[in-house]
Amino acid sequence: MGHMKTILQQGKVKQAVIDKFVDKATGIVGADNISSGEIDLLSTCRDYWPVSSIWMLEGSVPALPQLVVWPQSTEEVSQILALANEKKIPVVPYGEGSGALGGAVPLQGGIMLDLKKMNRVRKLDALNQLITVECGMNGALYEEYLNRGGYTGGHFPQSLRCSTVGGWLACRAAGQFSTRYGKIEDIVVSLEAVLANGTIFRGRSVPRAATGPRADLLMVGSEGVLGVITAADLCIWPLPEKRHYATYTFDNLADGLEAIRKFIRAGTRPAVVRLYDAQETGNHFPELGDERPGLILLFEGAEPIVKAEAGVVNQIVSGHCAVDAGPDFVEHWLETRFNVSAASRLLQKDAVLDTIEVTTNWHNAYVVYQAMQKALLGVEGTMMASGHWSHVYPEGAALYMTVVGFPGEDKVGYYKKIWRVAMEACLAEGAAISHHHGIGLHRGAWMEQEHGQGLEVLKKVKAALDPNGIMNPGKLGLEEVQQWEK
Amino acid sequence: MGKVNMEELLNCALCPNICRCECPVLQATGREAVAPAGKARLAAMLQKEQLGWDEEVLDAVSHCLSCRGCTIHCPFAELSLCDELLNTRLVAKASGARLLQVEPYLANLRNYGSPYGQKSETAACGEKGAEILYYAGCTSLANNPASIEAARSLFNKAGLSYQMIEEDCCGYPAEIWGDEELARQLAAENLRKMKESGASTMVTGCPECWLTFTGHYPEWGLELPLEIIDASTYFLSLLEEGHLKPGQADMKEVSYHDPCIWARAAQKTAEPREIIGRIPGLELLEANSCGEKTRCCGGGAMFQLSYPDTAAAIARRRLGEFAENTAIVTACPFCREGLLQENRQVLELVELLDRTCQK
């Protein structure tokens, strides 16, 4: 590994400082839970950011940490952070590495705090429909645990099987059933976290207390820059009594969007609402063809409610000339919804595939799609730019664009271009730059345009909670990263 | 075994791994280096010579139970990461890299034909020249002679002649540890003894042995001189034909643990359940993950010898998927060994059957 090229490394902590840290940290977590082995450093130095994959094929890595530490309790996290803070060693919290924007790249070396050994369920409170779960629990195993007791967590991101509960909270994740159960920020009731100086704090799991801003919920979406989320109280629901599937096609996307707006406005909450443009409809459901946008819906809950909701939705979409295509396409989607194989195959064929999710209101939902698609198709090398809406709310919907290009030699240059034009189009049309993938490293460049003066507020919060700047430096657009320009 | 398939390795290396939840090694250790994609990246880097062999690298790519759990959700139909990692390890020997903790077991295989060392007693017994040869496997011989006694008792109750030979290891441990040459030597010795026995059918008590005989021996160009049949299928046929008649069970319920490779590589999930279902008064309780979606007990790829602490941690996780306070039945000596924790009663299927069969 000595010859492995690091592209974004901003520096490293002096080895003497690391050695002193190891001496003390070993006493906290034990020798088995701390490693400076090259294989461990190499394995935790990246996430699912496509740029990392491009560099991997070229024999490079974004940056390398100097240590991996596996804490097993909140108290151990506290002691490790306090020690790292004292020695000003950067710390990057790490779950299962499914982040798509380089949020886990250890730009300044230091410690990868791998939280996967904090994977216990502390308590299931059936009466109050709450579960207390540690941050490192794998998403699929979390849902499996709940299912065994007759419950669901209602949170099914495409990364379910390769992400952690803590990762969901840290990047403000959304699941495929979000229209019924909400995003993770709606599902979390309180959380436990540790600040850079080792302070442990917990919120209370009482409903909607009017007790000022919630310190614990400040950590939701903080992507490791404010501290480490160690556990959370999440809502749970009984497994649904009934499911109902429906598929419709529309003459055009605008009709589909308007139909969705109306059935949400009418008070229906299908768990799954996914409206694909014609191209994606053809890709995912070839039998539906690629000329009409397709909408798949999944309703679940008590049987009378499901029946009533499906009836209301059917009545509304029928008013928009929808064609009923039956339930089978939803079953197909359920079977294939976690499949993420395309990127691996395409990367080996010199293509770049990425997804860019944004969120916007109803008044410009279609315009944002048009603008982003036009911008992406305008980049030399782009072969395909398509989209779907998969999370809907009374005030608007999230748009998920997929782009594939064959850029030739300069894949990273192409990646930067598609993101630049997509973000510019998104902001110009009034959308927000992310719905659920978060900011990480790459999207940080647009945080000022996104937040305006609000970014300064966030920087002050960061400075107050992490004065030494040890927590996941260079992320969330809070500091400039000279090695990586948009 | 074939060469490493680079395209498939990279498919895995570039994937976020929706199989992570099904990798017992990752879930027990929390180490990214031993996640499916972590190992695939290392194997790919070795192939591309971006990385050189050393003990640390060999240790990481050896952290695979060969349980094929990663195939349950894998979107790449052609990919078998377990096999790619095995192929990768087979290259390691030539590089000089050694997994030090398995060296004594490899020496045992060379010297005594068993990874567990010198056999305490001879396995050879029964009626010389009998049509049926029972091959218990080295793990049962070393750790659970009761299962061998149960099999012999069942042959006797069915009124069938059988023989056992002085077994050598089937070769599976040597192969899994990257010593294909030794595996082939053991295979040749076994073949010689099989031929000498004069038997026409060999009943295997260990799923790994069955898979090695029926899968790897032909890959190595070795022709088997007799028919190989696994113990579950064989004893089920004796039940079906009325040679064995189970009586009332001495327990009300049991949980069945599907051995991972047995369920996924051989699709042997129905036969053990058929046997349990034929025992009057015995209710079968399924584990949370069962059938072809079973989870490894930690005993795959000889982990109980090479990584005993990890194997035990994986077994503890698996035990949490069974109903409490019930006996666990399995069809694999490794699984029995691994699940024998936390005061659980664990039986091999032949032991359960023998307890209930009067005839």
Image (cartoon, coloured by chain):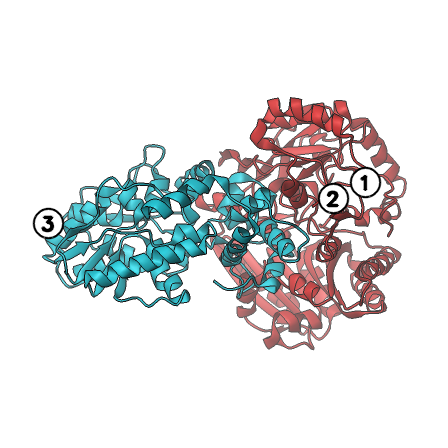
Chain colours: A red, B cyan
- Labels 1 and 2: the sequence-earlier one: 2
Tag 1 residue:
A474
The crowding category of the residue bearing disc 1, from other C-alpha atoms within 10 Å (few below 14, some 14 to 19, many at least 20), is many
Q: Which amino acid does label 3 sit on?
A: Gln
Cα gap from disc 1 to disc 2, whole angstroms:
9 Å
Element at badge 3?
loop
Residue B263 image offset from top left, x and y in percent: 38, 57
Do callouts 3 and 1 point to residues on the same chain?
Answer: no
Q: Quadrant of residue A364?
A: bottom right
In the foreground, A170 or A260 = A170
Res B352 visible: no
> Which of the 4 quarters of the picture holds residue A290?
bottom right
Residue that carries the numbered disc 3 in the rendered image: B358
Seen from the viewer's position, the closer of residues A14 and A208 is A14
Q: What element carries label 1?
A: loop
Given the image, on which type of amino acid does mark 1 rest? Gly
Label 2 sits on a secondary structure element that is loop
Question: Tag 3: Cα neighbours inside 10 Å, few (<14), some, or many (≥20)?
Answer: some
The residue singled out by tag 2 in the image is A105
Q: How many labels does the image show?
A: 3
Figure quadrant of residue A104? top right
| Residue B31: % across, % down | 58, 41
